[in-house]
Image (cartoon, rainbow, N blue to C red):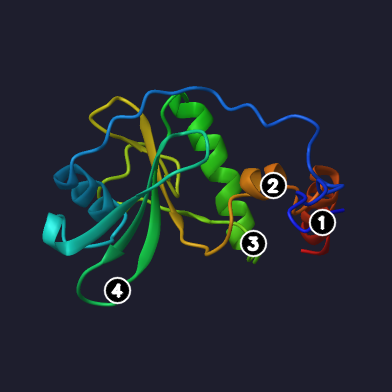
């Protein structure tokens, strides 16, 4: 046990790395990001009205932290759901909206489209489409580490994480 010996692996580390679907990423132009944000009431629809930073991780490959430049300086996450159908993206947004309504603080809640731009009769409507043809939703911004990254580095065991989420939801 020399001074330069590597640390032993975490007992919670997965036996193999998590596998993610390989998706090609294409950046969404800042003009379109601004217009999409405005559909959710964030910013004024111009690139000067929002600041966007692409986040990395997750499956969609096109997730942006967005913040209003003026006004209330609200923050959110714009998620371009590449590789998902619109119905699947809407179902995911419905789950995220449910978590938000129930007060679950550990997950991003889906934000509704403004009624003037909602494309369906369902209310609230959470999903629109971008120029790439992919569904888009907006979520509240929650600081933290993506669950897949925490699992991969062994910071938490998958069954323990899911058990804690289930217990919290059961108390709601």
Where residue 65 sits, quadrant-wise, is bottom left
Is 32 on the left-hand or right-hand side of 86?
Answer: left
Mark 3 or mark 1: whose residue is earlier in sequence: 3
CA–CA distance in space, label 3 to label 1? 11 Å
Disc 2 vs disc 3: Cβ atoms closer than 8 Å?
no
Would you name the residue on which mark 3 appears? 106
Q: Helix, strand, or loop for circle 4?
A: loop
Q: Secondary structure at mark 3?
A: loop
Q: Assign the C terminus to one quadrant of the image.
A: bottom right
The dot on residue 153 is: 2
- The structure residue drawn at horizontal position 30% and vertical position 64%, both measured from the top left corner, is 67
SS at mark 2? loop
Q: Please give the residue where the numbered disc 1 appears in the rendered image.
A: 164
Q: How many marks?
A: 4
Residue 74 spot, x, y in % from top left: 34, 70
Instruction: Give the residue pinned by disc 4.
Output: 73
Instruction: Please give the label number shown on residue 100.
Output: none
Q: Residues within 10 Å of mark 3 (few under 14, many from 20)?
A: few
Q: Earlier in the sequence, mark 2 or mark 4?
A: 4
User: Does 90 appear above or below 49?
Assistant: above
Query: Relative to 169, does residue 126 appear above or below in the rendering?
Result: above
Describe the element under mark 1 as helix, strand or loop. Answer: helix
Q: Earlier in the sequence, mark 1 or mark 2?
A: 2
């Amino acid at each position: 046990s020399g001074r330069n010996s590597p640390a032993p692996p975490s007992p919670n580390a997965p036996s193999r790395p998590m596998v993610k679907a390989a998706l090609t990423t294409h950046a969404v132009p800042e003009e379109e990001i601004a217009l999409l944000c405005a559909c959710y009431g964030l910013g004024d629809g111009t690139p000067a009205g929002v600041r966007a930073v692409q986040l990395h991780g997750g499956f969609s490959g096109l997730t942006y932290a967005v913040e209003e430049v003026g006004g209330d300086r609200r923050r959110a996450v714009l998620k371009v759901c590449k590789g998902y159908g619109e119905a699947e993206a809407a179902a995911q947004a419905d789950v995220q909206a449910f978590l938000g309504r129930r007060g679950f603080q550990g997950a991003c809640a889906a934000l509704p489209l403004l009624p003037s731009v909602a494309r369906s009769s369902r209310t609230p409507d959470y999903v629109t489409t971008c120029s790439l043809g992919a569904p888009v939703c907006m979520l509240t911004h929650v600081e933290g580490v993506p669950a897949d990254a925490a699992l991969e580095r062994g910071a938490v065991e998958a069954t323990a994480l899911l058990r804690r989420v289930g217990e919290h939801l059961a108390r709601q």
